[in-house]
Image (cartoon, helix red, strand yellow):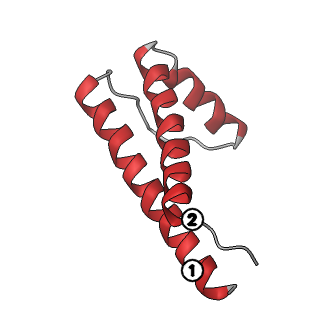
Amino acid sequence: METINKNKTGLTFGFLLSFIHLGWSVLIGFGVAQTLLSFVFDLHMISAPIAVLPFSLTKAIGLVIMTFAAGYIFGWLMAFFWNKCFK
């Protein structure tokens, strides 16, 4: 098996997760997140008292940074274990 580059894998996962959460922040900013969330819950036949809060730039930036970090760590660990298991 081929060795996976831990840094590139971490960056890939980090950017993927942060891009998804950036998109979610944009939906909140445009005011359509609550409608989308309610629609998805309704499709799953779930009734939950969840409300999307007003947009906050500080929280949106924090969300994107934290999800990038979590994605990077996950990707790095995945590549690390892959390389160890499939030498």
Picture coordinates of residue 65, whole percent (x, y)? 34, 42
Reply above or below: 57 against 80. above
Q: Assess disc 1: are there few (<14), some (14-19) or many (≥20) residues with their C-alpha within 10 Å of its C-alpha.
A: few
Hey, which quadrant is residue 83 in on the image? Answer: bottom right
Q: Residue at x 32, y 21 (%)?
A: 55
Residue occupied by mark 2: 5
What's the distance in space between the residues labelled 2 and 1, CA to CA?
Answer: 11 Å
Which type of secondary structure does the marked residue at label 1 adopt? helix
Nearest to the eye among marks 2 and 1: give it. Answer: 2
Picture coordinates of residue 13, whole percent (x, y)? 54, 52
**Quarter occupied by the C terminus:** bottom right
The disc placed on residue 1 is none
Reply above or below: 9 against 58. below
Picture coordinates of residue 80, whole percent (x, y)? 53, 76
In the figure, is residue 87 to the left or right of 12? right
Q: Amino acid at mark 2?
A: Asn
Hey, which quadrant is residue 9 in on the image? Answer: bottom right
The disc placed on residue 81 is 1
